[in-house]
Image (cartoon, coloured by chain):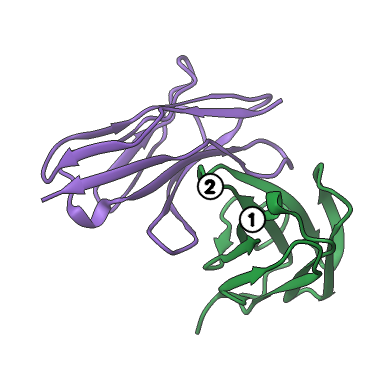
Amino acid sequence: GNSVTQMEGPVTLSEEAFLTINCTYTATGYPSLFWYVQYPGEGLQLLLKATKADDKGSNKGFEATYRKETTSFHLEKGSVQVSDSAVYFCALVSGNTPLVFGKGTRLSVIA
Amino acid sequence: DTAVSQTPKYLVTQMGNDKSIKCEQNLGHDTMYWYKQDSKKFLKIMFSYNNKELIINETVPNRFSPKSPDKAHLNLHINSLELGDSAVYFCASSQDTGSYEQYFGPGTRLTVT
């Protein structure tokens, strides 16, 4: 079946540090990959997506590249801000299956 | 102009009670979902409805019964609440079953004492 594995958190960084949150996946067929973000007290929001191999999704300074050879979709940001503190979920969908989420990685950015 | 709304936001109740959570979306979407998020933030799909019809029913106790009176609403009724039901429940919607972008509500924090 389809599954997503994310690095365990929490991740604590100082403002302006470089962020990487690792995500690898197992899927049948050709999945589309996503990062969702959940800010404190809110529901999830789509952050970025990539629908085929070598695509790069980007939004709000975050990037992730769909790597089929390593089955990965790592999230990166060059310089994090306090406002980026949230829980980040990697997810995939393949065919008509529902979204499958990873367990989430909590990011705390301190000033 | 909330896209996906849920009520109530917080729900505290005792074991054995029956409660409902309501969800409404004003996006014109055909597909709606219920997710459960546990204390470790793990998110698991419970149900999915497309145009008022149940299409996904994951392994969820039959104490949980979704109801979709129309495609803009998907309510969740829970009978005989147990301590383990304490969690945050999220409603979400998408354009259709083939759409990958889901829009989430703000969540309902259920606490069973």
Instruction: Kindly identify which chain the residue marked by label 2 belongs to.
Output: B
Q: Quadrant of residue B26?
A: bottom right
The tag on residue B100 is none
> Residue drawn 84% across and 69% down?
B67
Tell me, yes or no, whether the two marked residues, 2 and 1, touch with CB atoms within 8 Å: yes
> Residue drawn 55% across and 29% down?
A4
Quarter of the figure with the N terminus of chain A: top right
Q: What residue would you read off at disc 2? A: B39
Closer to the camera in the image, A21 or B109: B109
Are there few (<14), some (14-19), or many (20+) residues within 10 Å of tag 2? few
Instruction: Kindly identify which chain the residue marked by label 1 belongs to.
Output: B
Closer to the camera in the image, A58 or B39: B39
Give the amino acid at mark 2.
Ser
| Relative side of B47 to A58, left or right | right
Q: What residue would you read off at disc 1? A: B86
> Residue drawn 56% across and 74% down?
B9
Whether residue B30 is visible, yes or no, is yes
Whether residue A77 is visible, yes or no, is no
Chain coloured purple in this rendering: A
Location of residue B83 with respect to A77 vertically, above or below: below
Q: Position of residue A104 (x, y in %)?
A: 46, 40
Do circles 2 and 1 both sit on a common chain? yes
Chain coloured green in this rendering: B
Q: Position of residue A85 (x, y in %)?
A: 28, 51
Q: Quadrant of residue B65?
A: bottom right
